[in-house]
Amino acid sequence: MILADAISITEFKDFGSNDTANIIYRGRIDRINYECNIEPNYTIGNILIIGTLSLGQDAQDNFYNLPAFVAVINKNKEVISRSYVDINVSIPEGATLARFEFVLEDFKLNFERSKNTSDYQILVGFKLTADQVEFNKNL
């Protein structure tokens, strides 16, 4: 599941100005998939994160690291694990938009008391600064 508040990330040259001319890039997670094997006490598999990165007017490079997180919550909505990854995206020379596919290999979800997989959710999103969270609220 993609966390709605963290589905997109916008990087500004200066966070004092939300002007579109100040945007370095915008990233968006479009889809995730978890293909796994279920064992007696855990699941293990690969998480596929698919998204897009578009360059803004202030972009200087063609390569960006998008900070993301993967968290697991239980049926009580408690976070039981969290990890951070960098999604590396290269944009071809002359292009302003790129699609990315990132695979987090061998992701392990350890069961707590319940062995029922529907008692757990995997949340994926971008790791945002306070300014980015505020910007997303106003979209």
Image (spheres, grey):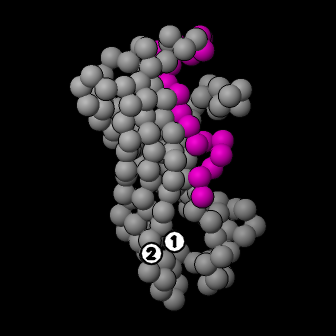
Q: CA distance from mark 1 to mark 2?
A: 10 Å
> Any magenta on residue 3?
yes
Few, some or many C-alpha atoms within 10 Å of disc 1 (few <14, some 14-19, many ≥20)? many
Asked whether disc 1 touches disc 2, contact meaning CB atoms under 8 Å apart, the reply is: yes
In the image, is residue 105 part of the stretch drawn in magenta? Answer: no
Q: Amino acid at mark 1?
A: Leu
The amino acid type, in three-letter code, at marker 2 is: Cys
Front one among 88 and 20: 20
**Left or right of 100 on screen, residue 110:** right
Residue 117 location (% of width, % of height): 61, 78
Label ID, residue 36: 2
At 37% across and 44% down in the image, what residue appears? 100
Which residue is under mark 1? 109
Question: In the figure, is residue 86 to the left or right of 116?
Answer: left
Image: 134 above or below 87: above
For the N terminus, the image quarter is bottom right
Q: Is residue 80 left or right of residue 98?
A: right
Q: Quadrant of the rendered structure where residue 51 is? A: top left
Check disc 2 and report its element: helix, strand or loop: strand
**Looking at the image, which residue is at 48% across and 83% down?**
38
> In the displayed structure, would residue 8 be above or below residue 3?
above
Give the quadrant of residue 99: top left
Q: Position of residue 46 (x, y in %)?
A: 40, 66
Mark sitting on residue 7: none
Q: Quadrant of the C terminus?
A: top right
Check the image and report above or below for 44 versus 105. below
